[in-house]
Amino acid sequence: MLQTTLAGSLPKPSWLAEPEKVWAPWRLEGAELQAAKRDAALVWLKEQEDAGIDIVSNGEQFRVHFVHGFLQDIEGIDWAKKTKMGIRADRYFVDVPTVTGPVRRKGSVHGDEARFTRAHTRRKLKFTLPGPMTICDTIADAHYGKRADMAMAFAELLNQEALELEAIGVDVIQFDEPAFNVFMADVRDWGIDALHKAIDGLTCTTAVHICYGYGIDANIAWKKTLGTEWRQYQEIFPALNKSRIEQVSLECANSHVPMELIGLLPDKDVLVGSIDVASNAVETADQVAATIRSAAKYVAPERIYPCTNCGMAPMPRAVAVGKLKALAGGAALARQAL
Ligand code: ZN
């Protein structure tokens, strides 16, 4: 009961990439970079195991960004053709690469790192992939014409990748869909269909992570516009509850999301975000336990997985380690109490 896990990323060690940045450039290249990524993954597996995290990951040490890590080896994307795009309904504007032809996987994207990670831990292993809707909100389209069509094309590629990860021994595959909080009508119209295509044929555990983003300035400014109660989840949970995705990862710590909304997911495992990633203040175990206990008012404890609100990539490394320990410590306290 109350198995702990992470939403996704962990900070890169300072010898691997510039610390405390979302798009941190690598500090090495070629074979040295490949070796350094593996070393960083080993560091984080050990830190997670020592902290007492039950379902571990490689902390996304092999990718520079949670979306572009998957896209970098996909055919049909012109990385030189940059298009200025308003991301997450114009929350911020960036020059993004452009899809100029049918997308196709040239080969395995994450297979090597998954095999490496699998070989170095006996714990349950989670692997994260960007969700189809979030991919389409992070890349420009000059080929498909309709976002839903492009999402289905990417979902097919994600499915190929996910089946391979499952065969390598990954226990949980999670799709990151921060765009689900922004395009709620699209979630109901085609977002969940795209996820279903991405998990087609999988027998491992499947999850979707829906957050309010990293603690970066653009997200903090956006959150201020959402009012005192954030009810975006309410518009998509009934449809998600009917979906074939088994777990839903949510932001609950220091959040303006009313906790009662998780009661709209009676048939799902709920990954209760009990660690705030927008603050460098390390939670106490008591604070974490309090978040878990308040979630347990609406979801049976057997269905609760204490988790982080989102990835911890932009945080100082020592803070992330402290938060891992707080998460496991808080889950242990809550386990006793419940
Ligand atoms: Zn997130």
Image (cartoon, helix red, strand yellow):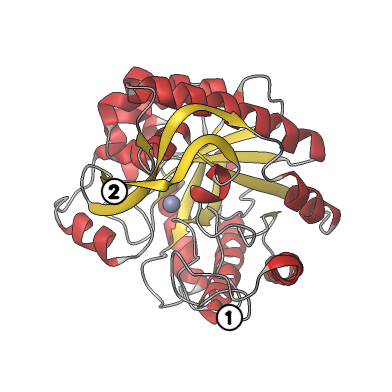
Q: Which residue is mark 1?
A: 14
Instruction: Report the amino acid beneath label 2.
Output: Val
> In terms of sequence position, does the residue under pointer 1 or pointer 2 come before the other?
1
Q: Is residue 226 above or below residue 298?
A: below
Q: Secondary structure at mark 1?
A: loop
Give x and y (percent) for residue 169. 80, 40
Give x and y (percent) for residue 88. 28, 44
Give x and y (percent) for residue 238. 36, 24
Q: Residue at x 71, y 39 (%)?
A: 108
Q: Secondary structure at mark 2?
A: loop
Mark drawn on residue 194? none
Mark drawn on residue 257? 2
Q: Is residue 131 above or below residue 10?
A: above
- Mark 1 near ligand 1 (CB under 8 Å)? no
Q: Is residue 85 visible to us here?
A: yes
Label 2 Cα crowd, 10 Å radius (few <14 / some 14-19 / many 20+)? many
- Front residue of 301 and 49: 49
Q: Which of labels 1 and 2 is toward the front?
A: 1
- Front residue of 64 and 101: 101
Left or right, 122 with reference to 230: right
Which residue ends up furthest to the front in the rendered image?
Answer: 80
Instruction: Report the amino acid beneath label 1.
Output: Ser
Label 1 Cα crowd, 10 Å radius (few <14 / some 14-19 / many 20+)? some
Quote the CA–CA distance across marks 1 and 2. Answer: 34 Å
State the image quarter where residue 207 is shown: top right
- Front residue of 135 and 194: 135
Kindly indicate whether the residue at mark 2 contacts the one at mark 1 (C-beta within 8 angstroms): no
Q: Is residue 261 visible to us here?
A: no
Q: Residue at x 47, y 27 (%)?
A: 101
Q: Residue at x 64, y 74 (%)?
A: 28
